[in-house]
Image: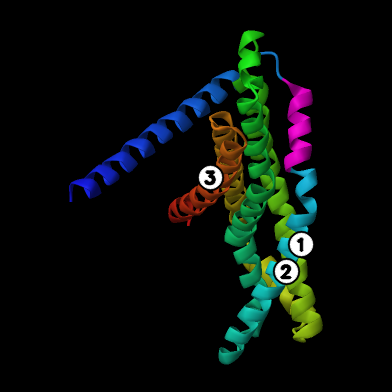
Amino acid sequence: MTKILETLGGFAIRSIEEMGQIMMIFINALLWTFRPPLRVRALFKQMEFVGVNSLFVVVLTGAFTGGVFTLQTYHGFSMFGAESLVGPTVAFAMARELGPVLTSLMVTGRAGSAMAAELGTMRVTEQIDALYVMAANPVKYLVVPRILAGILMLPLLTVLANFVGVVGGYIVAVHLLNINAGLFIGNIVEYLKMGDILNGLVKSAVFGGILTLIGCYKGFYARGGAEGVGRATTEAVVMASVLILVSDYIMTAIMF
């Protein structure tokens, strides 16, 4: 019984310490964001890395998600003669949940892991310590551009995923399931509101901040050589994915 309590207590202490470290690096990044000079070149480089380099996986994910969701909703709604609601249901799902969440998870696996690996390598090879020696703050130099890039690019990637998802759903619905094209599009225009889209974009901006913050944090505090870098990369993907899903539930409960 004592060992169980010791294990639980140790886990609780480590979790609290980790939460404190995450909050500290977030606060430092927030403070250094508004201190000149603004590293525009580094910001655009990270925006390219997070956004442009993720286009293919986001388009692929959005298209097949919209197509699969259309198939599932059609077979369900056809039992009640409600095939005309397939279009708005797909659009609602993509705009509110599937677009922001799946886009963020894909970018976490591609960009968040790379950030953790890159910063972790810099940590174990003492490049981050060298920045301190040169009087360059590593948080402003390494962390701030990545977090800003995540916050700015995730909503744009989500818009693309939403559009491609609806297009994929349209192709499946109209050309494979023989749903009337005008009915499919007309019901989307009638039922989908701008607020649904904006709420999804707010979610994606928060998710972008989460995945880049966790990726930077895990890499920034990596220890133990190459093995530590690999462990930090894995932990970054797992932690960011879990936090995205948890925060999605919280924001959904608040917004809708």
Label 2, label 1: how many angstroms apart (C-alpha)? 6 Å
Q: Is residue 179 magenta?
A: no
Which of the two residues, 137 or 179, is positioned nearer the viewer here? 137
Circle 1 packing at 10 Å, graded few (<14), some (14-19), many (20+), is some
Task: Tell me if 173 is positioned left or right of 17 in this view.
Answer: right
Image: magenta residue range: 39-50
In the image, residue 247 sits, relative to residue 135, either above or below, namely: below
Q: Amino acid at mark 3?
A: Glu
Dot 3 and dot 1 residues touching (CB under 8 Å): no
Position of residue 105 measured from the top left corner of the image (x, y, whole percent): 61, 53
Circle 1 SS class: helix
Dot 2 and dot 1 residues touching (CB under 8 Å): yes
Name which of mark 3 and mark 1 comes first in the sequence: 1
The circle on residue 64 is: 2
Label 3, label 1: how many angstroms apart (C-alpha)? 26 Å
Circle 3 SS class: helix
Circle 2 packing at 10 Å, graded few (<14), some (14-19), many (20+), is some
Q: Amino acid at mark 1?
A: Leu
Task: Tell me if 21 is positioned left or right of 170 in this view.
Answer: left
Q: Is any part of residue 34 visible from this angle?
A: no
Circle 2 SS class: helix
- Residue labelled with disc 3: 235
Q: Amino acid at mark 2?
A: Phe
Which of the two residues, 86 or 9, is positioned nearer the viewer here? 9
| Residue displayed at 68% across by 41% down | 114
| Residue displayed at 67% across by 80% down | 71
Position of residue 129 measured from the top left corner of the image (x, y, whole percent): 61, 17
